[in-house]
Image (spheres, rainbow, N blue to C red):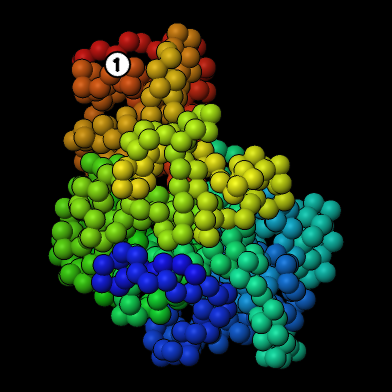
Amino acid sequence: MRATEDRNTGRPGRPWIQVTTLGDMLGRQAELRPDAEALVFPGERLTYRDLAGRTQRFSRGLAGLGVRRGDRVGLLLPASADLVALLLAAAKLGAVPVPVSARFKARELAHVIVHSGMRICVTASGDDGGSPDFPALLTEAIPGLRNQRLADLDLPEAPELRRIVLLGATLNETAAAVSHATVSAAEESVRVRDPAVLVYTSGTTAAPKGALLSHEALVRLASGITGRLRLTPDDRVWTAIPLFHGGGITFALTCVNAGCAFVHPGFFTPAGTPAYLEGEGVTVALAAFETIWLPVLDQPDFPDRDLSRIRVVMVVGVAERLRQMAARLPGAVQVSCVAMTESSAFLSLSHLDDPLDKRLTTGGHPMPGMECRIVDPMGKDLPPGQRGELLLRGPSAFDGYFRDPELTARVIDSDGWYRSGDLAEMDVDGRVTFVSRLKDMLKVGGENVAAAEVEEFLLTHPAVSIAAVVAAPDARYVEVPAAFIQLKEGAHATESDVIGYCVGKIATYRVPRYVRFVAEWPMSGTKIRKHVLRASIREELSRRGITEAPKPRVP
């Protein structure tokens, strides 16, 4: 039993029960609104009847390949209706789909294949113009594939991988040998607490970790988002978040929960997005990251498009940038969140009737059923407004890291509290605000510096579009701030310009001692890989023999 959120206020309403499996959730919508659009991708549209039918066919095909309860099924595919249907198909059988990042290189791919112990991996040729050559990437990751057929594999470097399946005729052939009754029996045996998806974290600081998300966690969160954003079957929800990403998966499942249309660009390019949003009549834009939404807002045709149907935009970032983005689409309510894979995506989300300032400066209230605490290094709860480590627990929390009981025991205590490793704060009303990863805290001559605070100030510079601050080693201060900056199109600035802009406006120990300009960011999913930036500045300084940063001066 839990408190849902009233469609008119977004606030807690009367208790009701809404816990089911992913397969049951889809089946319900296929019965209620079979002819309504469920999935929209460029060149392909599926109704709920279509999606349920394709999912059933894929379930039979997977069962025909020997997939059973608990088996991991790798999905190395471009964002597509097939990927959504395959994820649901594996989950219906009680198997555990493993969406694999299309951006992984061979080493990362090999790690996920081996660590997840996937029994089969479903992939495609990658000829859609935006995807890599997946079969070639698989061969690079697992060299033994060069000498074997795709079935009945025997690979010492990946001993649990039994088959590579190219999406197409194979699943249709194996489906013919499996009855609908067989799939129905398997589906009926799936429990809400069973693992539904194994999502590998983005690996911004280390090798990707596999987070186990249950059917209950995903369905509860989907229901909570439906209430918080007041989604109805008439909504058309757009996102460009990849479907191997926890957010992309959750957004798709939320649309199934609400019975509305999930609109995805497949391969995302900002240039065509304003026209796509207009043409599809999008009502809710789950942009999520400023690295996605800002380039869309900056498209030359954006002001000329009729985007009046967009009523909600969800995007995270520093307050100054969020304020600027909200002003670009004033007819929409812009909300923010705190999210992570370990909370099945959203941990918190703004209410639509929150004051604008709260929607820009906080991540909103925890999702229904989720609890949050802010603690000091000794684990003592801190009062509202003070910063500390964010702890969380509740029905949408993950069940631990797959095949890593030691790490799971370190981060989840006996009372179920997950230590996120995030620096955050809560206000007196319970709204959560993410500040930075604890690893993004710099210690400059004994002074604590939050990278996010320096980044927020840098964004007030008229030439700066995106900023990322990391620690650079220093003989005198141990570490000092180094800023990586992407300039606005057509803008110009030098290192001394940026440093001089900071001097006298923020504390000296927070002023970046090094500024490096970038045109492209090292990305993992939708996150900037700060460990790559840290390594870059460390290696540069070592190569140049620089051990101590110069004092910041006004140019």
Mark 1 belongs to which amino acid? Thr
Q: Is residue 361 left or right of residue 71?
A: left
Q: Position of residue 470 (x, y in %)?
A: 43, 29
In the figure, residue 67 lies in which quadrant? bottom right
Q: Is residue 206 above or below residue 273?
A: above
For the point 37% across and 78% down, the residue is 260
| Relative horizontal placement of residue 249, taking residue 172 as reference (left or right) | left
User: How many residues crowd around disc 1 within 10 Å: few (fewer than 14), some, or many (20 or more)?
Assistant: some
Percent of width and height locating residue 43: 41, 78
Nearer to me, 443 or 160: 443
Tell me the residue at 43%/89% (across/down).
32
Q: Is residue 302 visible?
A: no
Question: What's the residue at 61%, 70% (across, down)?
Answer: 192
425 and 514: which is toward the camera: 425
Mark 1 — residue? 508
**Measured from the top left, where is residue 531 in percent x and y?**
51, 34
Task: Note whether residue 303 is visible.
Answer: yes
The answer to whether 497 is drawn above or below residue 426 in the figure is: above
Residue 126: which quarter of the image? bottom right
The residue depicted at 48 percent of the width and 9 percent of the height is: 475
The C terminus: image quadrant? top left
Which of 555/194 is in front?
Answer: 194
Q: Check the image and name the residue furthest to the top.
A: 476
Residue 117 in the image, given as x and y percentages of width and height:
74, 58
